[in-house]
Amino acid sequence: MSTKKTSAQTVAFRLTSMLRRLNEGKRLRPEELAKEFSVTLRTIQRDLNEKLAF
């Protein structure tokens, strides 16, 4: 079995991490998240605006 993460797993990990931080009362800073997860700022913005909007 491959240990390489799929795209869906990577997105799920990123979203779960962001939700956990919000649940802990932490502030999310998109620029810092982009660096931490090695994605673009636009990707983080999409995550927050489209995938975590509720």
Image (cartoon, rainbow, N blue to C red):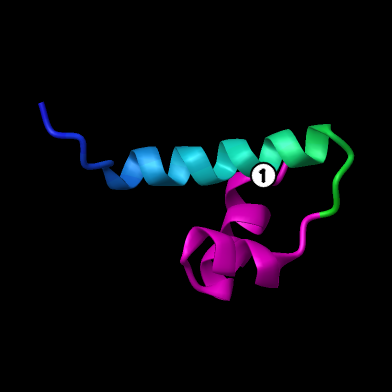
Q: Is residue 30 above or below residue 7?
A: below
Give the residue type that dot 1 points to: Met
- Quadrant of the rendered image containing residue 4: top left
Q: Which residues, given as a range, are shown in magenta?
A: 28-54
Chief secondary structure of the magenta span?
helix
Please rate how many residues cluster around mark 1, counting C-alpha atoms within 10 Å: few if below 14, some from 14 to 19, many from 20.
many
The answer to whether residue 24 is above or below residue 7 is: above
Residue for point 85% across, 46% down: 26
Figure quadrant of the N terminus: top left
Kindly identify which residue carries mark 1: 18
Whether the magenta-drawn stretch holds residue 32 is answered as: yes
Instruction: Return the x and y of residue 30 as percentages of the image width and height.
Output: 69, 66
Of residue 24 and residue 44, the one placed in the foreground of this image is 24
Q: Specify the quadrant that holds the C terminus.
A: top right
SS for callout 1: helix
Extreme left residue here?
A: 1
Residue 25: quadrant of the picture: top right
Q: Is residue 31 magenta?
A: yes
Give residue 10's position: percent from left, percent from top.
Answer: 40, 45
Q: Is residue 16 left or right of residue 28?
A: left
Residue nearest the observer in this picture, 28 or 1: 1
Residue lying furthest top in this view? 1
Residue 15: where, in percent of width, then height?
57, 42
At x 85%, y 53%, the residue is 27
